[in-house]
Amino acid sequence: MRFSSSIVLALPALALAQEQVPLADKIKGWLNQAQSFVSSAVPSVPSPMDAGAAKVAELVETSLTLDNWQSVLSADPSATTAGPEDFMVYITGGNKTCYGLCGNATKAWNESVALLSASPSAPKLAVLDCENEPILCNAWAVGPPSIYYFSIPHALADQSASAPLAYYILLNRTSVTASEITAIPTKETYKSAAPYEGIWHPFTGLIAQYQLGMPIGYVIWGFSKMPSWLPMILISFFSRSFMGRRAAAPQGGAAPAAAT
């Protein structure tokens, strides 16, 4: 009982922790939003290079959703190659999930997609937008901007397969370039760190094994929708109720007999 109560009280704190962003990033996000409101009054003309890269990315990449990600991130059974298939997933967001700071990373991603699409050995490309798919991002415990690189083996004749390898790569919001993203598969820079094997691994982690990703994703999403002051009030209410019950409980031991 004590353990379960601790979990209940910790959930609001976990949700708040996921929402914690350095103050400087929040201020930048607010400024970006304000700038977007001002610039919306003046029609902007994107450069032909940026527009072309974005168009290529739309045609090449696949958008991941809560319903399709498992079918998209799977090795093609009809493939003739014996080795695993690689997938590179760009995780992005908007004003709520990236505080308006993913623009540079998205531009670099689009340019890298245009370069990688011409390579026959390039990984399959996908995008996870946390603004549109917050449950899936919470289930994976990921945030934008970042890259998830998967190496997924083919199933054997008996339908068994070794575990997929997953590499999680954080991107610098302001300085990441297309060449850095392109180097992830072409120069295999993703191998500079050990593959992720924690409980949040989308395929083999403890959360995935017990099929808890979706429930946890909804719980965290629900807490993130609460006003910041509500979890504190709930914690204070439960604490006062618990202390009140302890104070009202009868004290152990019999009263000493009066001296005669």
Image: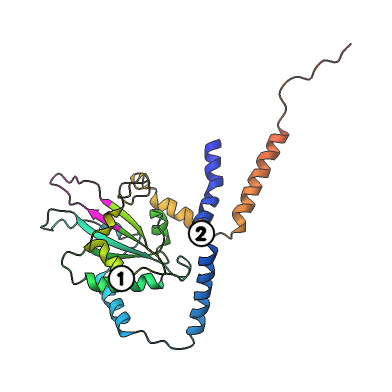
Quadrant of the rendered image containing residue 251 = top right
Q: Which residue appears at 43% of the width and 51% of the height?
A: 215
Q: Residue 19 got which mark?
A: 2
Name the side, left or right, on which 232 lies relative to 19.
right
| Image quadrant in which the C terminus is located | top right
Tell me which corner region of the image, top left, top right, bottom left or bottom right, holds residue 6: top right
> Where does the image place residue 259, in percent across and percent down from the top left?
87, 13
Residue 206 placement: quadrant: top left
User: Does 151 sit above or below residue 176?
Assistant: above
- The circle drawn on residue 178 is 1
Q: Which residues are magenta?
A: 149-165
Name the disc covering residue 129, or none.
none
- Using the image as rendered, state which of residue 47 and residue 232 is in the foreground: 47
SS majority, magenta? loop
Q: Secondary structure at mark 2?
A: helix
Q: How is the image coloured?
A: rainbow
Label 1 crowd (10 A; few <14 / some 14-19 / many >=20): some
In the picture, measured across the screen, residue 116 lies left or right of residue 198, that is: left
Q: Disc 1 residue type?
A: Ala
Q: What's the residue type where badge 2 is placed?
A: Glu
Residue at x 29% of width, y 82% of height:
49
- Left-right relation of 170 to 38: left
- Evaluate whether residue 62 shows in this view: no
